[in-house]
């Protein structure tokens, strides 16, 4: 295949990102102008809603070269792998499934690159190589020898490696589970993840230099929204602290992807331990920040909505703990039935009530600290969770905890 001349499209993309306030520094601008995204997107899927749900149609230079190149330079995320094996160059026509690799939209890639606050000569560990486009931008900015990128999927890693070579970068690509980092080349000045995580692995803190920055999308990934971009700085004592700098949405780390719930939901929620009216509507969970908080309060719980005879039921299931909450509308009121060893809705309701009482601050008010033992989140000096491994506000002391919490490092 001959290489198309995309210089004008690259300049336009850079202009658009600069005008949108995403691209701020000249070094990153040059990277966007000079790294050809098409080398990393030789084929990908265009998606659209269809009768079978979300449907993905393959696109490549072979299907329509002009359309392909124009799409490559849209500010869009393009899915490159579905269900861990389907790619757009072995297509069987339009397919459905769950995206497992992609080239993230340039505004997100560049926005995160800018947020890394890199300086010349710094080393970076990237988790989630994907197509390799973001890796190439890092190589352009910092030099190929200063970038280490880990991809969990061997086929995706191989393609990225080929594309990086074609772009002229013989960088350090590693096939493996990025949750473990890559100790061999540690310590790094910066660590960045382009997949979402339930918690920032402490190994990353250990592998990042004191004063170094870790940037990653956090929030239990059982829902497709309600996650935040955490930016934390590693301290001399081996802990790290920072805050959520904005909303962010990425596909979950492979080992953390939600397993689809099986079975009849009505049957699975037939025997409840308690039943009561709620003081918070589950519709609140449609908001990004409430969803973020709810997932911290009830990690591992999956959210499903079902309608039967015109009556909506909201289900929250924690398959690992065999616990559930089933909420049904009753006029303006909602009734919750809960079963299992943890009271999912109590935990969520208490957290949302405390958040409401605190004036409903947005996601950027959330701070977090990572220690070898815990992951703590707090807002304005008031702790909201102690650790994503356990349910936090399972009892009536929730609001009290919100108001009278101690240092998050003391949990
Ligand atoms: C959104 S894509 C990455 C986008 C990429 N940075 C780009 O610009 O093309 C997320 C990638 O993370 C990878 N991934 C998921 N879990 C991982 C893990 N535990 N370690 C390393 N890579 C992982 C996926 O296979 C996928 O390729």
Image (spheres, grey):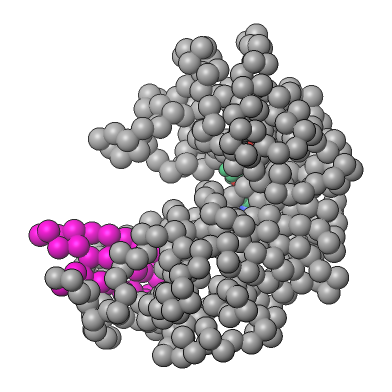
Q: Position of residue 171 (x, y in %)?
A: 80, 36
The residue under the point 41% across, 90% down is 396
Q: In the image as oriented, which residue stretches furthest toward the top?
A: 2
Q: Position of residue 241 (x, y in %)?
A: 72, 68
Pick the quarter of the image with the N terminus. Answer: top right
User: Would you say residue 298 is visible in this rendering?
Assistant: no
Depth check: 85 or 400 in front? 400
Identify the residue at horizontal 70%, vertical 43% (top origin).
113
Question: Residue 304: within the magenta?
Answer: yes
Please tell me whether residue 215 is drawn above or below residue 243 in the rendered image: above
Quadrant location of the C terminus?
Answer: bottom right
Count of all numbered marks drawn on residues in the image: 0
Q: Is residue 166 left or right of residue 105?
A: right
Residue located at (31% from left, 60% from top):
304
Q: Nearer the viewer, residue 134 or 320?
A: 134
Q: Is residue 56 left or right of residue 304?
A: right
Given the current orientation, which residue lies at the most extreme left position? 309
Residue 181 among those drawn in magenta: no
The percent coordinates of residue 308 (x first, y second) are 14, 60
Residue 219 image point, x, y percent: 53, 62
Which quadrant would residue 232 be assigned to in this image?
bottom right
Q: Quadrant of ligand 1?
A: top right
Residue in the picture at 38% in, 56% down: 260
Q: Is residue 108 visible?
A: yes
Predominant SS of the magenta segment: strand
- Provide the residue span drawn in magenta: 302-330
């Amino acid at each position: 295949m001959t290489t198309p001349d995309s210089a004008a499209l690259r300049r336009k993309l850079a202009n658009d990102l600069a005008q949108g306030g995403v691209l701020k520094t000249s070094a990153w601008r040059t990277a966007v102008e000079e790294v050809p995204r098409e080398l990393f997107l030789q084929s990908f899927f265009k998606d659209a809603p269809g009768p079978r749900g979300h449907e993905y149609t393959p696109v490549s230079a072979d299907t329509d070269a002009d359309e392909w190149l124009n799409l490559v330079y849209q500010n869009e995320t393009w899915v490159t792998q579905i269900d861990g094996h389907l790619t757009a160059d072995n297509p069987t026509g339009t397919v459905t499934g769950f995206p497992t690799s992609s080239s993230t939209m340039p505004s997100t890639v560049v926005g995160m690159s800018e947020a890394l606050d890199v300086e010349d000569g710094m080393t970076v560990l990237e988790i989630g190589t994907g197509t390799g486009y973001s890796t190439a931008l890092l190589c352009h900015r910092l030099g190929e020898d200063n970038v280490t990128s880990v991809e969990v999927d061997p086929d995706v890693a191989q393609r990225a490696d080929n594309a990086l070579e074609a772009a002229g970068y013989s960088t350090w690509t590693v096939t493996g589970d990025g949750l473990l980092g890559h100790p061999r080349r540690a310590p790094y000045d910066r660590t960045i993840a382009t997949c979402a995580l339930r918690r920032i692995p402490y190994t990353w803190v250990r592998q990042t230099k004191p004063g170094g920055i870790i940037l990653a999308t956090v929030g239990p990934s059982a829902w497709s929204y309600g996650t935040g971009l955490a930016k934390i700085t590693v301290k001399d004592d081996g802990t790290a602290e920072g805050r959520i700098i904005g909303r962010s949405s990425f596909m979950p780390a492979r080992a953390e992807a939600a397993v689809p719930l099986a079975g009849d939901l009505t049957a699975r929620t037939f025997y409840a331990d308690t039943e009561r009216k709620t003081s918070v509507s589950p519709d609140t969970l449609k908001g990004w920040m409430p969803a973020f908080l709810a997932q911290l309060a009830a990690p591992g719980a999956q959210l499903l909505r079902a309608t039967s005879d015109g009556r909506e039921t909201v289900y929250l299931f924690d398959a690992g703990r065999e616990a559930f909450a089933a909420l049904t509308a009753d006029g303006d009121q909602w009734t919750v039935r809960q079963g299992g060893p943890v009271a999912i809705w109590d935990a969520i309701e208490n957290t949302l009530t405390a958040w409401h009482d605190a004036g409903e601050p947005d996601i950027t008010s959330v701070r977090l600290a990572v220690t070898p033992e815990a992951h703590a989140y707090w807002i304005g000096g008031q702790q909201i969770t102690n650790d994503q491994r356990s349910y936090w506000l399972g009892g009536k002391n929730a609001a009290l905890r919100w108001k009278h919490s101690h240092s998050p490092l003391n949990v």
